[in-house]
Amino acid sequence: MIEISRIYNPPKGNGVRILVDRLWPRGLNKENAKVDLWIKEIGPSNELRRWFGHDPKRWPGFKARYFQELEGKKELVDQIIEIARAKDVILLYGAKDIAHNNAIALREYLEAKENTNAKST
């Protein structure tokens, strides 16, 4: 199971907590963050982050472009999928927008990949 949580929220439940932002969240030290793994390279490119700017009107375009970027990050995608097969995973993000952020898009991408892999076996 893959859950999503804003990194500033207190940890809930058990699961491998994976920060999926390219930048470390402001005002949060690594000791208090309770992050098990930081895969910053899985986050959207700096160019894409700047273009998106957390503008909900750009959400469909952001997802399409981010999914294209993720196609080139197969090892990182597979790493998260493998962890999620063994344990619950919590994707952590720092954005204020809880409906339009890279963790939500990444989960959608990961679940689609996992479903595709399950159908092909």
Image (spheres, helix red, strand yellow):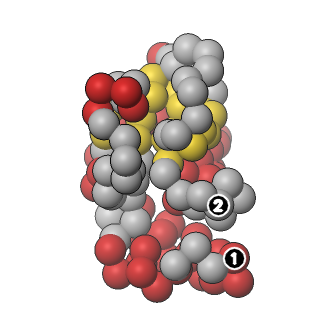
Quick one: 63 or 94, which is closer to the camera?
A: 94
Give x and y (percent) for residue 11.
55, 24
Residue at the image point whose x is 58% and y is 35% from the top: 9
Residue at the image point whose x is 48% and y is 17% from the top: 86
Numbered disc 1: secondary structure: helix
**Image quadrant containing the C terminus:** top right
Numbered disc 2: secondary structure: loop
Horizontally, is 93 left or right of 2 in the view?
A: left
Give x and y (percent) for residue 28.
37, 41
84 shown above or below 69: above
User: Sequence order check: which comes first, mark 1 or mark 2?
Assistant: 1
Residue at the image point whose x is 50% and y is 40% from the top: 7
6 shown above or below 41: above
Q: CA distance from mark 1 to mark 2?
A: 9 Å
Residue at the image point whose x is 52% and y is 40% from the top: 8
Judging by the rendered image, the residue that carries numbered circle 1 is: 56
Q: Note whether residue 101 is visible.
A: yes
Numbered disc in front, either 1 or 2? 2
Judging by the rendered image, the residue that carries numbered circle 2 is: 97
Give x and y (percent) for residue 113.
55, 48
The crowding category of the residue bearing disc 2, from other C-alpha atoms within 10 Å (few below 14, some 14 to 19, many at least 20), is few
Q: In the image, what residue type sits under mark 1? A: Pro
Q: In the image, what residue type sits under mark 2? A: Asp
